[in-house]
């Protein structure tokens, strides 16, 4: 089974600029079937309440393996993805399930990116575009790619795992992982050049 590798191609403290650059890369490979997903780590009950209200179509999930098995009365099962609309006003007792992940998966391009970036605040978050298509570049000995043609915008974070807080935002371009001869490096650099950028750091593996 093939895997991807993601290369950083743009870093900035300007959130709007980061989103614009990411969208330039997405536009280079967008297809009718392309989708976008978003997720963020939410560390406090007050922020869970805020994001529940401003992102009513989102889902909340607890990944804390040590969280209590029995949830407080009226709280949906957070160990499975729970719709934001099912979360009650009173979230007392949910501290043991923090941090929660808020997410919206497989949405149409352009449907959620601006709103999510505007409301996510200081939290570590990611916007991920998938089902893109990178064209071939025979003059550079590069083949076309669809299975691993993706773009990620990391907000307030330096890691695609959302576990490295930062005061900047990072655009990643994904390509197929190959063994030897620097093919991934050349492909990522060529893609970055299509939008006037360059690789600015080491690759991140899944």
Image (cartoon, rainbow, N blue to C red):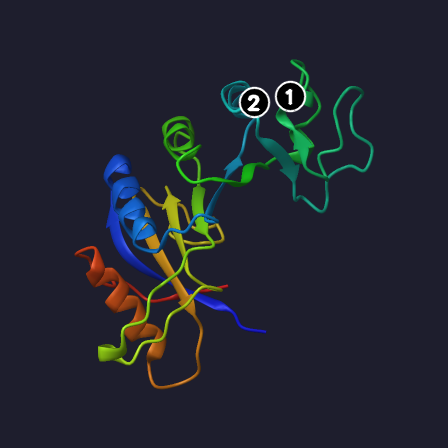
Place residue 160 in its image quadrant. Answer: bottom left
Callout 2–callout 1 Cβ contact below 8 Å: yes
* Residue that badge 2 annotates: 56
* Residue that badge 1 annotates: 85
Q: Secondary structure at mark 2?
A: loop
- Residue 45 screen position, x and y as percent: 58, 24
Left/right of residue 92 with respect to residue 18 in the rendered view = right
- For this orientation, the residue located farthest to the bottom is 181
- Residue 109 screen position, x and y as percent: 42, 40
- Looking at the rendering, in which quadrant would you find the N terminus? bottom right
Identify which residue, 66 or 115, lies in the foreground: 115
Residue in view at x 72 percent, y 39 percent: 80
Place residue 17 in its image quadrant. Answer: top left
Left/right of residue 5 with respect to residue 202 in the rendered view = right
Q: Identify whether 37 is placed above or below 51.
A: below
- For this orientation, the residue located farthest to the left is 196
Mark positioned earlier in the residue sequence (2 or 1): 2
Residue in view at x 56 percent, y 20 percent: 49
Left/right of residue 1 with respect to residue 70 in the rendered view = left
- Residue 136 screen position, x and y as percent: 32, 71
Q: Secondary structure at mark 1?
A: helix
Left/right of residue 130 with respect to residue 57 in the rendered view = left
**Residue count near mark 1 (Cα–Cα under 10 Å), binned few <14, some 14–19, many ≥20:** few
The answer to whether residue 157 shows anywhere in this view is no
Identify which residue, 86 or 78, lies in the foreground: 86
């Amino acid at each position: 089974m093939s895997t991807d590798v993601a290369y950083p191609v743009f870093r900035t403290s300007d959130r709007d600029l980061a989103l614009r650059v990411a969208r330039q890369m997405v536009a280079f490979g967008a297809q009718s079937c392309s989708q976008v997903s978003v997720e963020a780590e939410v560390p406090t009950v007050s922020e869970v309440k805020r994001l529940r209200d401003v992102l009513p179509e989102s889902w909340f999930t607890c990944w804390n393996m040590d969280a209590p098995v029995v949830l407080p009365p009226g709280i949906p099962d957070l160990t499975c993805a729970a719709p934001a609309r099912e979360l009650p006003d009173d979230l007392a007792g949910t501290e043991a399930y923090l941090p929660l992940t808020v997410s919206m998966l497989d949405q149409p391009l352009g449907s959620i990116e601006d709103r999510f970036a505007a409301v996510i605040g200081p939290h570590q978050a990611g916007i991920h575009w998938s089902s893109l298509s990178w064209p071939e570049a025979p003059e550079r000995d590069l083949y076309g790619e669809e299975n691993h043609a993706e773009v990620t915008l990391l907000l307030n974070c330096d890691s695609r795992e959302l576990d490295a807080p930062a005061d900047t935002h990072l655009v990643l371009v994904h390509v197929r992982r190959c063994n030897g001869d620097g093919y991934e490096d050349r492909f990522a650099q060529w893609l970055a050049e299509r939008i006037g950028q360059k690789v600015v750091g080491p690759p991140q593996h899944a």
